[in-house]
Image: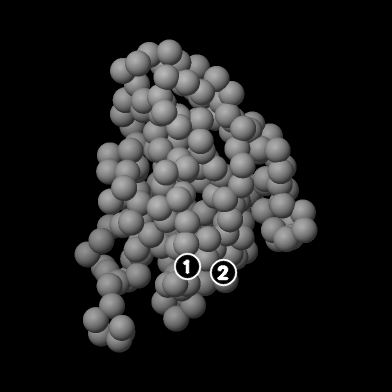
Amino acid sequence: MSDTTRAPLRAYRLLPSLGEFRTLYLSNLLTLVRWQIAGSPEGNKPTGLSGEWAATDVGDPRVRPAEFPSGYPGAPVLSRRVADLLGDELCRAGSFEPLDIADGPGSIPDAGEYVLYLVRSIVDCLDTRRSSKPKRAGGEVKKAVFRPEAFPADLPAFRLPVFPTAVYWNGWAVDRLKELLGDDLEARLIWSEDPTLIPHPNPWGVL
């Protein structure tokens, strides 16, 4: 596809939408964070990760578990259904790792089958002159502008060297996930080549 016909580049943060969904709290995140900060060494990937469903709504049959249940910026969690459908595409940037979830709602088929999407790809594509300065604690970049020539258009997701504990999602991957998840998913625009698209004012905030 030529540059004149391709869709504008976009980057997003993904998190569970606010609604009648059960969300997941992840345990032992420090293991994951250390791995991300260390440069994601292949031979030392985090293992034994676990989580538990939010205490509220446990046992309430009206509230189903989300298929993208974790809002932590650096630890996307997907249902096994979604992982199986998008595995070939998502594994270009990382791998699916086992996730032990306590107190899963056993009455819902396959509700305990979730995986952590471990994004390994780190891409230096930030336009530092036009972006906000990374925060000293953690490196969060509130306003990110990317260099189109360095943007990893072929990858579904990536991380930045200056902010390695957060996952950025490519626009085409978000479109694919939205097709499958619909209202389960909130997609906050971080950056786009298209000037008519307005980025979220606080993409890494809670609300």
- Residue 205 in view here: no
Image-based side of 73 in relation to 61, left or right: right
In the structure shown, which secondary structural element does the residue marked by tag 2 occupy?
Answer: loop
Note whether 49 is above or below 108 in the view shown: below
Give the residue drawn at x 25%, y 61%. Answer: 197
Name the quadrant containing residue 17: top left
Coordinates of residue 179 in the picture (x, y in percent): 28, 51
Note whether 36 is above or below 195 in the view shown: above
Residue that badge 2 annotates: 123
- Residue 105 in view here: yes
Note whether 151 is above or below 132 in the view shown: below
Image-based side of 17 in relation to 55, left or right: left
The single residue placed furthest to the top in the displayed view is: 59
Name the quadrant containing residue 4: bottom left
Check disc 1 and give the amino acid type.
Leu
Contact check, label 2 and label 1, Cβ < 8 Å: yes
Mark identifier at residue 155: 1
User: Can you tell which of label 2 and label 1 is closer to the viewer?
Assistant: 1
For the C terminus, the quadrant is: top left
Foreground of the two, 199 or 67: 67
The single residue placed furthest to the front in the displayed view is: 109
In the structure shown, which secondary structural element does the residue marked by tag 1 occupy?
Answer: loop
